[in-house]
Image: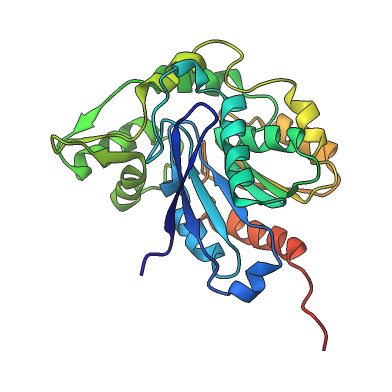
Amino acid sequence: MAAFEDRYWWSNDGIRLHARDYAARDAAAASARPPILCLPGLTRNARDFEALAERLSAQWRVLALDFRGRGESGYAKDPMSYVPLTYVQDVEALLTELGLERYIAIGTSLGGIVALLLAGASHGQIMGAVLNDVGPDIDPAGLARIRGYVGKSSSWPTWVHAARGLAEANAEAHPGYALTDWLRMAKRLYRVNSAGRIVLDYDMKIAEPFRVPGNEAGPDMWRALERLKTVPTLIVRGARSDVLAASVAERMIGALDRATLVVVPETGHAPTLEEPGPAQAIDALLAQLAPAPAVH
């Protein structure tokens, strides 16, 4: 039996969008808890969260989303819709369709920006947040690196070739990875096309708006962060990150009343959230949000 069901919904501009819906194995426990939304990075998809979602879905409903132009979601006719404010509208359409009034957001990189914008737009809906290696200010070095590779297509004859290509391009972010780890990442980032080649699983046109300065985030992100001031929030930073500077992470902690910072050693952009530190911190965050058991 699959750990999840495929769920589809429509965007405001007519794109068929996809999410993996992991029903909680303990349905009674989950019925009193908000679902968890997992929001992926710029070139990533719902598969990034498969291990985390399977673990958390013991007692929580987890929805891992494919943003438009990624994974099993449809591609946009207008590439200039590949911007955070549109992704927010897409997520809001899902929340409306499912009738979800409360949720917990776990966002990696771009997904963290979307989580921040959701918090800024919502009225009490977001109950907790995990911001993975991203904040209101993005380090220019990381932006330059991302702009240098996003939208550049590549293809490989085998999964091992794809894994070795990933290792060559990303060794600095994950210096401790073995080939098996790179293979795992490749299976999440790539797909097999109709010609049997291993190719990136996103629309290359997502790069078009991202190359326009300002489109990588949105309006004043520090103001959006203020909406999380009293919300339990976990900030995860890779110690080698070139996207979330240590000074920005510390400023975020100072701006929030209920925030925790976890730094993942020997890791760049971005941690997988499967490392021991983030995994334990996510469990601690969720423990704050789980209702106390009824006393009989």
Q: Is residue 10 above or below residue 98?
A: above
Query: In the picture provided, is 32 more to the left or to the right than 65?
Result: right
Report the residue that reaches farthest toward the bottom: 296
Report the residue that reaches farthest toward the top: 212
286 or 83, which is in the foreground?
Answer: 83
Residue 42 image offset from top left, x and y in percent: 48, 31
232 or 82, which is in the foreground?
Answer: 82
Q: Is residue 135 above or below residue 83?
A: below
- Residue at position x 32%, y 38% from top? 167
Tally of marks: 0
Residue 282 image offset from top left, x and y in percent: 64, 57
Query: In the picture provided, is 132 more to the left or to the right than 33?
Result: left
Residue 119 image offset from top left, x and y in percent: 73, 38
Q: Do we see residue 261 in this rendering?
A: no
Q: Is residue 176 above or below residue 199?
A: below
Q: Quadrant of residue 165?
A: top left
Quadrant of the rendering where the N terminus is positioned: bottom left
Quadrant of the rendering where the C terminus is positioned: bottom right
Q: Quadrant of residue 110?
A: top right
- Residue at position x 58%, y 61% from top? 61
- Residue at position x 64%, y 44% from top? 96
Residue 182 image offset from top left, x and y in percent: 33, 45
